Amino acid sequence: MISQENGFALPFKLKFRLDYQYAFAGISLFIFLLIIYSNSFYGDWHFDDFLNIVDNPYIQIKSFSWENIKNCLYGLAQERLSRPLSFLSFAVNYYFDGTNVFGYHVINFAIHYLAALFLFLFIYNTLKLPLLRDKYNYTAYPIALLATFFWAINPVLVTSVTYIVQRMTALAGLFYIMSMYFYLKGRTAQKFNHCVFFFILCALAGLASVFSKENAAMLPVGILLYDLLLIQGVSKDSIKKYVKIFFFPVTIIIITGFIYVDFSTIFDDYKMRDFTMVQRLLTEPRVIIFYLSLLFFPINSRLTLLYDIDVSRFLFQPWTTLPAILLILTVIGFAFYLAKKRPLLSFCIIFYFLNHLIEGSFFNLELIFEHRNYIPAMLLFVPPAQLCIFALDFFSDKKSIQFACAVGIIIIIAGMGNMTYLRNAIVADDFRLWLDNSEKYPQLSRPHSNLGNAYIIKNQRDKALFEYEKAMSLNNFGGIYARAVQEHNLGLYKFVDGKYDTALPYFESSQKILPFYISNTVHIVKIHMLRNEFSLAHTIVKSALGKYPHNSELNELFCLILLRENDFSAAELYAKSILQNNSAEPFPLAVLAQTSRHKGNLSAAISLWKRYQYFSPNNRLANLALIELYAAINDQGPLKQELAKLFCLRGNKSLFVYMNENFRQRNLQIFFPDYNLIKKIVNNNRL
């Protein structure tokens, strides 16, 4: 029989040493997680991935210079430290493989696996504490392993792993549980040097957690409560003792707050939302209870990225607001009441609510996201795992019932794993993600907006426009920020269609709300250039470069404006300065080629266009520029090679159609090929 007395060993005559038990836990977790996340390693970029990684110049490093590292540490705004360890990890990914998603997914998976491994170690060693040892001596291993499985394979955590930018959450979770584990080891170490060693590791992991994401600031409070409830034990004397040192974790939280948050703007930031700070505080208890329902009933029909939740306007609007608040207060109060008799259950409950405190408080954040459960849910499944093991032991004398219980546990694990695999299939694909989201919450604007973007990528522009207009008509963005993003999308749509006068108001409206959204500035400048308003374009770009001097698009536009203004000397100097900062940047080579051609130095122009062509072998502009230049100096050998390339590039299209398709926006080209000249050269060189 499987029972406490035999340590819940399987009915085989095999005895595993402790290190083998650890190995089994690590290997089984790895294999199972690898299977259920195997369809996520080539998952698309999504949503905030673009702002934080794909379009973030500060993590797109080509060397590990201090300047590059400092830019990573200061995040997007470049004003204060912003999740420095997370952004640095993205920069390392980018350094080795650019924006190839595979490497990012591998790291995300590794972080989640390690978090699960340390969670197992933490739970197992916690159950071996003197305060709990007698009760869990024989069941510590199966409870720890089962609780870890329940957490690690839960479909609610998919967005923390497969949604690349949420590495921030997973990394914070990994270092959070590492810090607690090292604290446990240090607190129970027999030798002084071991104690010091583990406490140093605890502090370093704690810092790493906070530097990954700010919600880890609750770690010191978590450690303090852990020590009180599960190591020291609750008594009047211990409570008095811990109250005296409570200022220490509170001080750490306050310091973390000042590192990450500009408290002077908290109230102003809510102007961007469709809800107030008070309304957010009233809504979050309902959200936290909804999270619990998802964690214990995580079927795919209930899971999505963006949820449409009613904002609590008052205590009774909706009516569930006050009951939710009272329920949470009652559960927390009950947990403290149980602290002495059932410290493990008490701590698991308190841990969940404690680690929802920051993201469920007054900070100006979105109301609901699944990934916020990554840390809070870490110990949530210890009581259910304990119940499962208790059931196996309770029915140890009834083989058929015990077998049914065991099968039930296996079915739960297999079912959750399958749901996670299916959820990954949706989350990994950008189109499926937003189609799924828009079907589940059709009255939300942002899923329609992002589905429109996915249709653009599929070149289904009519469907994209339908989704864009649907998003605008619903006008349920959750705040003016998201609406401004959609206005930008519509601006891009009209710009591509050549409707520049229609596109401009969208970009300008979006820029008022999103001044840091450089793409707005870039397209506003392009429209002014296409209108021959070079002076205005010059002013806008120069102002933007004052804030974002390293942005490649802005630098390229400034070079183009100088060329259009016929200020060739300034264009040449600026192009050279770009090359000094980045010798692998091809664009300034084309600018220098044109300034050389203007000066009459055709051989230098040819050399520069050839260098440019090295970086982009099939570039059509370089091909036509070289055809004109080789014809001008009558160099027949290279000319015939470029004409042969032109023939391959244009395929079955006529020369007129080919050039009209690729060079319509004359003022946005480094130079505009002369159709009549190219036609003459082609005709003169026909065999």
Image (cartoon, rainbow, N blue to C red):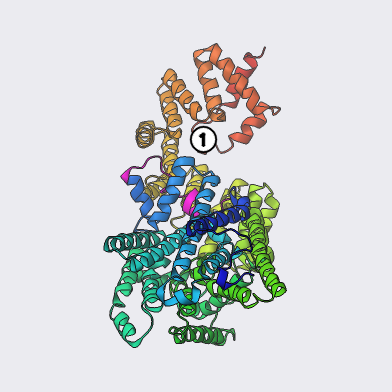
Q: From the viewer's perspective, is residue 216 above or below residue 497? A: below
* Residue 510 makes an appearance in the image: no
Dot 1 corresponds to which residue?
669
Magenta-drawn stretch contains 365: no
Secondary structure beneath dot 1 equals loop
Other-residue count near label 1 (Cα within 10 Å), few / some / many at <14 / 14–19 / ≥20: some
In the rendered image, the residue lying farthest to the front is: 13
Q: From the viewer's perspective, is residue 463 above or below residue 588? A: below
Magenta-drawn stretch contains 51: yes
If the image is split into quadrants, where does the N terminus sit?
bottom right
Q: In the displayed structure, does residue 601 sit left or right of residue 672?
A: left
Q: Majority secondary structure of the magenta segment? A: loop
Task: Report the number of discs.
Answer: 1
If the image is split into quadrants, where does the C terminus sit?
top right
Which of the 4 quarters of the picture holds residue 391?
bottom right
Magenta range is: 44-66
Where residue 53 appears, as percent x and y from the top left, is: 48, 50
